[in-house]
Image (cartoon, rainbow, N blue to C red):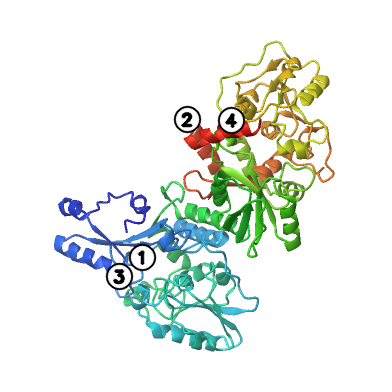
Amino acid sequence: MLRHRTLAALLAQHRLVTGAARCAGAELDALLGWGRKPSARRAERLARRRQLPLWRCEDAFLRSLDLGPDSAPLGLVIDDTGIYYDAGRPSRLERLIASPHTAEQLERAEALRRLWCEQRVSKYNGAREGPAPAEPFVLVVDQTAGDLSIGLGDATAASFQAMLAAALAHHPQRLVLVKTHPDVVRGRKRGHFQPRQLQHPRIRLEASGGHPTALLEHAEAVYVVTSQLGFEALLWGRPVHCFGMPFYAGWGLSHDALPPPPRRADAGPRQLADLVQAALVDYAVYVDPHRHQICGPDELITAIGLQRRLRAQLPGRIEAFGFTPWKQRVLRRFLAGSRLRFRFQWQAPGRRAQALAVWGRRASPRLLEAARRRALPLLHAEDGFLRSVGLGADLIDPISWVIDRRGIYYDAGGPSDLEHGLATGHWDDQQLRRARALRRRLVAEAITKYNLQAPPWRRPAGFRRVVLVVGQVESDASIRLGAPGVRTNLGLLQAVRAAEPAAYLLYKPHPDVLAGLCRPGSNEAAARDWCDELVVDAAIQQLFTQIDALHVLTSIAGFEALLRELEVHTWGLPFYAGWGLSHDRLRCERRGRQLSLDALVHGALIDYPRYVSRHSGLFIEPEQAIEELLAWRSAPPVPLSLRQRIFRHWGRLRRR
């Protein structure tokens, strides 16, 4: 039990005393055992000897992302009466199901049931969905031999044979799909069916170990002994046939081969919402996967649903080329759900690769040819637009990256997933309201890509128009691939001076140049001759509040200024140009659609990037990323590690 690192958090409302010596001398209110496993027998003996109540805990029906031994539980049930899978004795869950529920509770339970199906979750959620057969089918669910829920659920190994025979008999024109338990697929345990028992021409074995959602969604009926999949099938509205007595049987919601215990029969039929409220709300306690703090079932369902969606978006086997060891570590988080293999740029893709990953546009001609010849998707990784507190050149871990299949957002020479989404996307009122709230929060909290702190800057008095020109690293790919006209910082500054002769002109070099991590641009030292003020110390978010307009080549600062509804002039082709929101010197033929600012925000900050929590390493929503950035920014600064300092100087020398 103590191997579960989330146990203390799940029991946060109690004081957990562990260790024989401490327990022997402590004034205890109860003893805790794990279900009815053999290890709980000692707890039973101790409870009798010390005349204490025995509480039994078990995994909740929404447990975790991955399978038991590999992933700590995020949901726990605690039963002071029995345990839910023991039909021979009362349990707290049984009492909760039989209890009356208010209209508000039943309404919430129905909303929770819908959310379960919308987010496509199950007890374990790490596997990709197993595909459902194209033809009509009924689902027969196997379990692991020796599962306590079988014997304690009034069933035996023979119940599985009876179940399979009934499925064949009840549905003579249908395929019968037998689902093997994931632990059997992994070789950890054995099931109840031998190959000779599955020779019937209408039987097909489903032994992929895949997530069961699609099977439950499309099955015409589901046959179980005591498996939790019977409960989940009820959530999906499927007819369920039980050949044991699981907790959800005997309430008039399933077709039961066995008579219910008198306790359940006396309670009378119950609604599905009664079952959901009792099992998912009242009986269990949950912690969120990031901070391990107590949360509601809807919050955990939504969090796990996000992991499932993003994990399923990319192919299962990806080979990554040319990533530094530091970026390899980061890439594993942003490509969670896929098996990664790292290779050098000069190597060829392996035979089992389903996709290739590169940083930005750094794919060699040989790799591009291999991807084209084998029709392998090429995934381009880059920093997101809300990145970190600190510079990427200092090896500060990012909170967001983008993974682009078509190209990359800063390459105006071809389409990207972002450009495609902005050109073709449609966002309803609810989505636009979400984007608006996100944008307003970013502005109110002065959040930008790097969130660097600096002394305040004050607008000079007496000037009607103050204009900011933002410098970039001239060797950056965004200039090479997104600025076909003016391509240097000095050239931009000169062009802006010619366009705005009467304005008070500020010039802010790129933070990496100011930090000595990248070389200044060509003749950038002459910038002082073309501006009224060279701004070195001020933070960009503070400048935004005091300027009238911004001029950029392709800098992300232009997007950040648009979020604040500032006047933005682009001299290159950044991703936010061409949608009617900025004053653009160049035109991209693929763009031209008029977008609202909130549509741009939804496309660029909600649809396009992936966000990963600094605490859990799991995917989060952009709103959660903002909360983490705020906490990160307000925390005391952490000195650079030795590795970061070495890389910092090495990178500066390498760029000389």
Q: Amino acid at mark 3?
A: Pro
Circle on res. 446: 4
Residue 488 in the figure: left or right of residue 13: right
Question: First in sequence: mark 3 or mark 2?
Answer: 3
- Alpha-carbon span between mark 4 and mark 3: 56 Å
**Image position, residue 391 (x, y; %):** 58, 33
Front: mark 1 or 2 = 2
Q: In the structure shown, which secondary structural element does the residue marked by tag 1 occupy?
A: helix
Secondary structure at badge 4 equals: loop
Badge 2: few (under 14), some or many (20 or more) residues near its Cα, within 10 Å?
few
Please give the residue where the numbered disc 3 appears in the rendered image. 90
Residue 596, visible in the rendered structure:
yes
The CA span between labels 4 and 2 is: 18 Å
Mark 4 residue crowding within 10 angstroms, few (<14) / some (14–19) / many (20+): some
Q: Is residue 164 left or right of residue 475?
A: left
Q: Is residue 630 visible?
A: no
Residue receiving disc 1 = 93
Tell me the amino acid under the disc marked 2: Pro
Which disc is residue 637 wearing?
2
